[in-house]
Amino acid sequence: MTSANTPPDDAPKFRYTGALAQEIERRWQDRWEADGTFEAPNPAGPLAEPAKIADRPKIFVLDMFPYPSGTGLHVGHPLGFIGTDIYSRYKRMTGHNVMYTMGFDAFGLPAEQYAVQTGQHPAITTNANIANYRRQLRRLGLSHDARRSVSTTDPGYYRWTQWIFLQIFNSWYDCEADKARPIDELIDEFASGRRPTDDGRSWNALSSAERSTTVDAYRLAYVSDAPVNWCPGLGTVVANEEVTADGRSDRGNFPVFKRNMRQWMMRITAYADRLIADLDLLDWSDAIKAMQRNWIGRSEGATVHFQSTAGPISVFTTRPDTLFGATFMVLAPEHPIVDSLTTPDRKQVVSQYRHQAASKKDIDRQDDTREKTGVATGSYVINPVNGESIPVWIADYVLMGYGTGAIMAVPSGDQRDFEFARLYGLPIPAIQRPPDRELDTSTWDGAYVGDAPYVNSASDSLDLNGISGVAEAKRLTNEWLERNGRGEAAVTYKLRDWLFSRQRYWGEPFPVVYDLDGNPHGLPDELLPVVLPETDSFSPQTFDPDDEFSNPESPLDRLEWWTNVELDLGDGAQPYRRDTNVMPQWAGSCWYELRYLDPTNEQRFVDPEVEKYWMGPQEAGHNGRPHPGGVDLYVGGVEHAVLHLLYARFWHKVLYDLGHVSSKEPYYRLFNQGYILAAAYKDSREIYVEATEVEERDGSYFYNDQPVTREWGKMGKSIKNAVTPDDICGSYGADTLRLYEMAMGPLDASRPWETRDVVGMYRFLQRLWRNIVDEETGDLALLPTPADIETKRLLHRTISGVRDDMDALRFNTAIAKLIELNNHLTKLGGSPADVAEPLVLMVAPLAAHVAEELWAKLGHSTSLAHEPFPVADPGMLVADTVEYPVQVNGKVRGHITVAADLDVSAVEAAALADPKVAASLAGVTPKKVIVIPGRMVNIVA
RNA sequence: GCCCGAGUGGCGGAAUGGCAGACGCGACGGACUCAAAAUCCGUUGUCCGAAAGGGCGUGUGGGUUCGAGUCCCACCUCGGGCACCA
């Protein structure tokens, strides 16, 4: 196949072709590496160069690091990387000390699955994949400080992942101080009697097993026997965040079942309020903030206690003010009190309903008819506010996993309760008088939610009637509940604690052993890292995806030589059994930005001085708002909105509470780049065909002359539409690829890849080259005369605009401005010397290799990576004369060119005097003339 | 249903409330070539017109304004997220 840009045999020898571009690129990549051009100095430690730091503001630019997959990069992957590279290069040229590197998030399922298929150890394939990624990223010319690169799978890295786990394990959440504290301080509180034990006995009276049980209940990382998401198809448990809306695994799309199992949990719920509140500190999009708030799902309301024959039943409600309208109670079918509540005559129907609810699988749950179902238990509870006896039902629209698994049903004020009441003929008393509605609810077609005066809402001791504000009514009801011991204000969250263990092989082992009684013990620092044991059997036990009652079996369980150890943890050598779970893939990505700062430190996960320099609070952020510290710019895909970004914030906050880091948040400014989409084609059998071999004819698409259908999707091997950066670099060079990806559109928008469009940026670079270099000789060839005033003005306008665009990450419009300037030079027949230098410097962040080459041709012997970025001369941004468009009634009818400093009345006179304007006025006397100085004139006739 | 975001030429996209369509692709015409490719030059929103020029144009309908792609209200469509969450 002939490449689209194949030059003729007799082409000029030094034309900027794909071949020449690649030669230039290789040469400069080697030189940057040899010179350590992009190495960023630290204030302390092995990478310290204090002299280089003085007077240079720091900036930390971070990409979400990739999982190094076996198929390598396609052109969609580096979109964000190119953006951060351009920004980093620009910031270096504006005098910043830039932290910019790349690591690899290399634990996880695909490497393990590949290992199972091929018998190769995942470490081998992972290292090969990382090497391939490094090669591909280097070829793009990314200006990483290679010394700082890390892989989460390196024992020197995960030693500290394990250390942080132990910090969390050895902490508890002090609700009064609202922060995590070391577990030893909790033990002190128990020992000194300041904090009572659960059953009130003194600390000394407890056995050591009782003590550890007491303390373990407070730990931020704890073993729990609670409902978890068991995924037989993966052979492991997964976190709530990894379960999709239809009850399947995020990875593999296997069914997931709720089962009680003993697993590691992290008490992220303790941080729920701070994870919400501190979003206000962050420069993130409202969309991502909304997703996090939504996921945490904070609801304010009240817990209300109802009396039943089987004891008190608590419900959570966000509308305590509607308590007078509660005419029945609904329990989740799984609610433990159901058995003792059910009356003998209802036993059969209740048990039948519960069985039916339990067997409901995701397919039934997806059923969109969603008709309410439920059965009565036969029992009644007392509504505390008015003493009325109301029936208790069970229904699957009430979920055991939220609130208390029980609700008070207020049919007039809640649509679900309304539907349920209508279906089963339960009373629907109005408790508010909505505008435009009858008080008789039989005329309603749905519940009423809003501010309206309360009616039928009074007892001897609480009267809401006549109040029209929900907030006020809530407040009064909450007060009444608390005064009478019938309830209290309460907050619930959708967020659950984080299920943290996985029954897989390719992950971080837990630095934990169990004693003979089964109590967990964190290992001391000197026993870290707990290295993932070698084996040739890393296959986890997986099961029939629908086999709900299978049991997890970790690969590490099989390694008896590894699991059984004898250790002295303080009271003599004892036998212990190692924890055989591994951590989830999210663990390594919860703190990697910190390790970049000090990658080789063996004493600490990061040196405090180094951490403070790069991550500490700043005087002002990029937009002038306060900067609470953290990464200055974090670029990545939106798919991590509630997984990585929530977990990493949580870990960072624990580290902050314990004094290990100086910023409250890890990522100050977040920018979500879009995706590159690509056309994929399916034949008549619905099988994907190779996209590169599809031909377009008159808007239809053909593969081997057979018609195929087109769709747009994320690029990928599975839908046969991947284009690799290696292909594009091979045809045009990396600089063209970088420009094309940035010129396609704004960085945060998704856009379709069109290989045929790439040539536009290639032509731009070719023209740029030709304006400065003689294509025949390769020598510098500038115009002999300095730039005229028009060219100078354009240059300075371009400088000013490009700076603004670079600061705002608008690389697409920066490129457009540079092309405009270059097109102007083309018309001049080449570049004057005083334009070539600033132009090359402006191109440098975007197309770094060709800019370096041109810079060298312009006579410079050093890299331009740290050259000052051009600064616009303000005097060149204003012209002597200005052209005004003249509108008549809002339509442009003519143009006038006048002196820039002409006063308003003179501009008005000039406009009215313009022949075209006069013609379109046709003798009508203007009612009003608006002159916007320097902008335009509008004549109202 | 709720919460975000977006609708602009044939395509990707540009426009501090101030000349809509920058820049790129494609298309068309031309140069070079035996020819093609590559490269270069020119034209390119749409309709009427030979041209000059004019009409119409940023999803739809209203509004604010001297002036609206941009602000406000209502609606339509598409994309993303959440969803019997009490």
Image (tube, coloured by chain):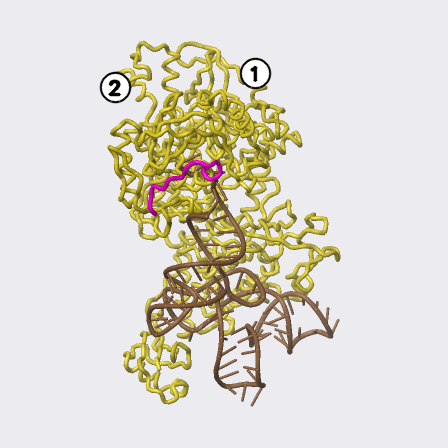
Chain colours: A yellow, B brown
The quarter of the picture where the C terminus of chain A appears is bottom left
Residue B15, image quadrant: bottom left
Magenta span:
A421-433
Residue ID for mark 1: A561
Q: Are marks 2 and 1 in contact (CB under 8 Å)?
A: no
**What crowding class fits label 2: few (fewer than 14 Cα within 10 Å), some (14-19), or many (20 or more)?**
few
Residue A120 vertical placement versus A917 (above, below): above
The chain carrying label 1 is A
Hey, what amino acid is under mark 1?
Trp
Say which of marks 2 and 1 sits in front: 2
Hey, what amino acid is under mark 2?
Arg
Residue A145 in sight in this render: no
Residue A630 vertical placement versus A566 (above, below): below
Tell me which residue sits at (45%, 37%) in the image. A421
Q: Are marks 2 and 1 on the same chain?
A: yes
Residue A623: x and y in percent read 34, 53
The chain carrying label 2 is A
